[in-house]
Image (cartoon, rainbow, N blue to C red):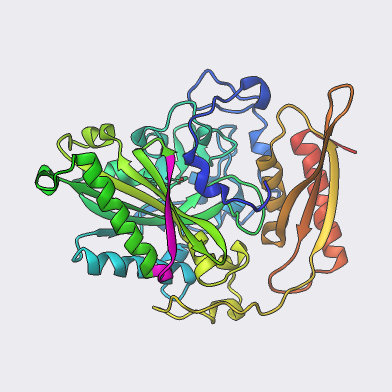
């Protein structure tokens, strides 16, 4: 998809969509469909040394073999494994850490430190935690292997921080914020990266809270939610114009999105709503109501710090990292240079199992962060019913000029892998 929307953010804001077994080759007998056995092929050809020892994630020790497995039910590429444990949101001098701390500050001051803060929960979760516990329907598109990284049929890299809601409620927390890295198979452009960061907020109320308000419990929670998040938006953006838009999420009812008017555009800031009663009930809190919200940190940080490309968050180049200061939200990033892009087009007849996410996984596997954008520039179906796609791949480094030889080699590699792994004939 083009860089028009942050598809990341809207994955859950759609009602469930049935996965068509004929269209994408998925076996829809199971609620979680395992694709045909060629899934493994979408993994990167670059192999990262398995010697890299144990990672510790939220107190859990994990080796590469626990995450990247040569099995048809695993679609985690090496490149994704290398991002585990980096936890950009825990670096106080990093834009994501600065933003997280600014949000913490808002909650600490306005709620008297009542919100428990979690930012080190293990990103490896069960499908139950990621989907079932937050009532994601069994046919919801987010469950597909095309959208989510599966370690095995029952274990995923969390695709949203909502994966921790139910567990924390069960453990008795009533007010909490969960920040973490989340993982989604996705397209390639300046606002999409397969790993990004979210913050989830939950607040639980008891009858005492709403009894004297003259409102019913749901209305009370919705009012409190809106006041809280409007205050947060002002804390981050200053005196901006805002609007509420009705939305849909499986875990909330009613559901809303907050938009702010920023740099002459309406920008979607977060999703939220009154928590579905079923989630509270299962957490042993039938007599309570709660609100919840989820926001994407990159999306906000790109606007607040003027960061033009999502890949920059991962840069270790001093010219990027040295521009930010702990505790300072207002700093605007000054691009240190713009190196020339290089465009390469590639045309092919698609087959039944073709998806853009699979193509992008190959491109990232070959080119890593040198891939700036993968864009569909031509699409037609001939009289025989065959569909041709032409994709333009933009290669560009954030840090240096690329040589022709280097780019040609990347492109040949991509072409090679597209043919062999996706079983596609290039035109
Ligand atoms: N989990 C949602 C997503 O990733 C974001 C979200 C929306 C979280 C509404 C919430 C919520 O807690 O109430 O798209």
Q: Is residue 242 magenta-colored? A: yes
Question: At x 57% / y 25%, what residue is drawn?
Answer: 19
Question: At x 60% / y 38%, what residue is drawn?
Answer: 70
* Nearer the observer, 110 or 310: 110
Residue 192 location, x and y as percent?
Answer: 60, 54
Q: Quadrant of residue 277?
A: top left
Q: Is residue 147 left or right of residue 160?
A: right
Q: Is residue 328 visible?
A: yes
Q: Is residue 197 magenta-colored? A: no
The residue stretch that appears in magenta: 236-247
Label tally: 0
Residue 53 location, x and y as percent?
Answer: 49, 58
Quarter of the picture containing the C terminus is top right
On screen, residue 19 above or below 122: above
On screen, residue 37 above or below 81: above
**Residue lying furthest top:** 29
Q: Quadrant of residue 336?
A: bottom right
Q: Is residue 401 left or right of residue 212?
A: right
* Nearer the observer, 336 or 243: 243
* Nearer the observer, 60 or 184: 184
Question: At x 85% / y 42%, what residue is drawn?
Answer: 347
Question: At x 19% / y 40%, what residue is drawn?
Answer: 217
Residue 60 location, x and y as percent?
Answer: 36, 52
């Amino acid at each position: 998809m083009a860089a028009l929307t942050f598809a990341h953010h809207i994955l859950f804001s759609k009602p469930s969509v049935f996965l068509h077994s004929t269209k994408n080759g998925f076996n829809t007998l199971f609620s979680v469909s395992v694709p045909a056995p060629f899934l493994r092929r979408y993994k990167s050809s670059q192999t990262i040394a398995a010697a890299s020892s144990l990672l510790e994630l939220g107190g859990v020790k994990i080796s590469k073999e626990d995450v990247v497995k040569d099995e048809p039910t695993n679609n985690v590429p090496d490149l994704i494994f290398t991002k585990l444990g980096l936890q950009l949101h825990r670096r106080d001098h990093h834009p994501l850490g600065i933003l997280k701390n600014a949000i913490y500050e808002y909650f600490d001051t306005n709620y008297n430190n009542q919100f428990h803060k979690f930012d080190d929960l293990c990103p490896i979760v069960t499908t139950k935690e990621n989907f079932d516990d937050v009532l994601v329907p069994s046919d919801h598109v987010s469950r597909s292997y095309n959208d989510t990284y599966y370690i095995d049929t029952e274990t995923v890299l969390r695709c949203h921080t909502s994966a921790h809601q139910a567990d924390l409620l069960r453990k008795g927390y009533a007010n909490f914020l969960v920040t973490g890295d989340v993982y989604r198979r996705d397209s390639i452009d300046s606002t999409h990266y397969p790993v990004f960061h979210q913050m989830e907020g939950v607040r639980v109320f008891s009858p005492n809270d709403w009894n004297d308000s003259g409102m019913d419990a749901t209305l009370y929670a919705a009012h409190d939610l809106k006041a809280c998040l409007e205050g947060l938006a002002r804390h981050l953006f200053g005196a901006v114009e805002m609007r509420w838009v009705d939305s849909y999420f499986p875990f909330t009812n009613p559901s809303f999105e907050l938009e702010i008017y920023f740099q002459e555009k309406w920008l979607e800031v977060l999703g939220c709503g009154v928590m579905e009663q079923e989630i509270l009930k299962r957490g042993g809190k039938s007599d309570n109501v709660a609100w919840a919200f989820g926001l994407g940190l990159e999306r906000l940080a790109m606007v607040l710090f003027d960061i033009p490309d999502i890949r920059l968050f991962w840069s270790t180049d001093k010219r990027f990292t040295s521009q930010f200061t702990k505790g300072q939200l207002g700093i605007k990033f000054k691009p240190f240079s713009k190196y020339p892009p290089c465009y390469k087009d590639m045309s092919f007849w698609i087959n039944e199992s073709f998806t853009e996410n699979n193509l992008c996984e190959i491109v990232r596997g070959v080119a890593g962060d040198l891939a700036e954008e993968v864009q569909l520039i031509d699409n037609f179906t001939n009289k025989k019913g065959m569909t041709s796609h032409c994709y333009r791949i933009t290669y560009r480094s954030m840090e240096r000029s690329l040589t022709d030889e280097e780019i040609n080699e990347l492109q040949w590699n991509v072409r090679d892998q597209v043919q062999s792994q996706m079983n596609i004939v290039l035109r």
